[in-house]
Image: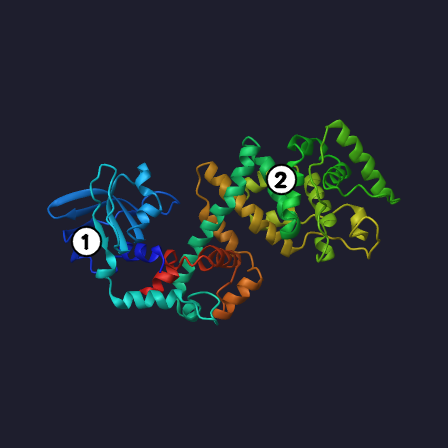
Amino acid sequence: MKEDFIHYLWKFKKFNWKELYTTDQSKLTIINIGKHNTEASGPDFLNAQIGIRDEKWAGNVEMHLKSSDWYAHKHEQDPAYDNVILHVVWDYDVDVFRKDGSSIPTLEIANFTDKDQLDKYQTLIQKKPQDWIYCGSSFAKFDDFLLESWLERVYIERLEDKSKLIHQLLKKSTNNWEEVLFKLLAKNFGLNVNGDIFLEMAESIPFSIIRKTAESQTQLEALFFGQLNLLNDQLEEPYYVNLQKEYAFLKHKYQLKIELQQKPQFFRLRPGNFPTIRIAQLAALYHRQKNLFKTFAYAYDLDKLKSILKIQPSEFWKSHYNFSTTSKKSQKQLTSKFINLLLINTFVPFRFAYARYKGKDENEFLLQCMQAIPSEKNQIITKFESLKKGVSKNALHSQSLKQLKKQYCDKQRCMSCNLGIAYLK
C-alpha cells in the first residue's frame, strides 16, 4: 500500500466518515476535509475543519501509513507541521505529540474503510506480468469524455514541466525572450541525440553576436560549426576552408571560447538528421527570418508559421550530408514532420510560458494548435493504441499519453490519476 490511497479515501470520503472515533475513542466529525496539498513539502491537507468531542478545530491534516512515520520523517522538528490538528494513518503504532507535549489526535482510517475499497485498490496496484500499465486490462473501458478531459489536463502539466527549462534559460539571459527562443530552437533542432550539445553551443555564444552575424549566412554557419568543434579537421574542400577562416576571424573578434568537450553524434542517425544538416538549417532560419521572436510570440495562424519554417540550407548542403562526401543533390528543406516537432517542442511550450509571463491565458489556442498537429508515432503511443484503438488522434493526445506514462504510470501515481480514481469508483 502507498500513502496516496489514504489521500484518496480522505479526499473523496471513501470510508465511513459519519461514524468516526480517534484512537483514544473521542468522537470525530469532519466539517471540511481541507485543500489537498500537491506540493513536495508541508502537510497533506491544508485548512481543514474537524470536530473532536464538542470542540471545533481548524488547521492541517497529515497522513502516513504508520503513525510512527511522523517521527521517521522528523515532522516534530519542522514548524510547517505545528498546526496539524489530525493525524490520519492506516496503522496506529505510536502516539504523536506536538512540541508543547500535547497529543495530536489520530484517526486509524483502516478501521472505517470497506474491504471492497481495499480489494479494488490492491487489484489496481498489483500489476500482472502481461500488463504494461497498472490499469491496462481496464484501459479500453474508460469513458471517452473522461479520457479526453484528463489528457487535456495532463498536457497542461506537461507544458508546465517544459516551462521549467524555459525559466532557467530566461534567468540566465536576464529576461531576454528572444535569446531564450534561439536556445530552445537550437536544442530542438538537435533532437534527442544532439539536443543537449546544441543547447550548450547556443549558450556558448552571446545572443548579441547572433544578431550581428545574422546578415551573413556563411558567418552564422561558421559560428555554429566552430563552437560545436566541427571545424578542426584538415580538409581541402573550399567551403570548409572558408568556414575555418570565418570562424577564426569571429573567434578572435568576439573572444569566443569553445566550452564543449565533445562533438555532436552522427551514429545511428538518418542522414537528414545529421547535426551538420540541422545546424545548416538553423543558420538558414536565423539568416532569413529577422522577426522570428515576434512571429513565435504573437502568431495565431499555424499554417503561416509552418510556411515560415520551410527553409533550406545553403547551396553546399544540397549536395552534402557532411563536409567530405558529395551526395545526390536534394533541397533538404525542413520536412512537415520536423516542422511539426518544432511546433510541439518549441512553439507551443514557448508560447505557453510567454503568455503566462505576460499574464495571459492562451491555453485554449494552444490546445487547438496541438489538436491540429498529427499524432506522434513511437513505442509509447503504439502501446496505448494496443490498449484502446484510436486513443491518440493528434499531437495533444500523443504528448499527453507520454506524460501520463512517465509521470503517473511509471511512478504508480494511480491515486493522483483520474483514470485510477475512476477505476476504484
Q: Which colour scheme is used?
A: rainbow
The label number, if any, that marks residue 76 in the structure image: none
In the rendered view, tell whether residue 119 sits above or below residue 101: below
Q: Residue at x 31, y 68 (%)?
A: 119
Location of mark 2 (residue): 182
> In the image, is residue 421 above or below residue 276?
below
User: What separation in Å lies between label 1 and label 2 (alpha carbons)?
Assistant: 60 Å
Vertically, is 77 above or below 252?
below
Q: Hey, which quadrant is residue 199 in on the image?
A: top right
Secondary structure category for the residue under label 2: helix
Residue 247 in percent (x, y) is at 78, 35
User: Label 1's element?
Assistant: loop
Q: Residue at x 35, y 63 (%)?
A: 422
Residue 154 visible? The answer is yes
Q: What residue type is labelled 1?
A: Thr
Residue 196: which quarter of the image? top right
Residue 299: % across, % down: 55, 43
Instruction: Give whichever of 238, 133 is nearer the camera.
Output: 133
- Residue on which the image places disc 1: 23
Pair 1/2: label in front: 1
Q: Which residue lies furthest to the front in this view?
A: 94
The answer to whether 122 appears left or right of 370 in the picture is left
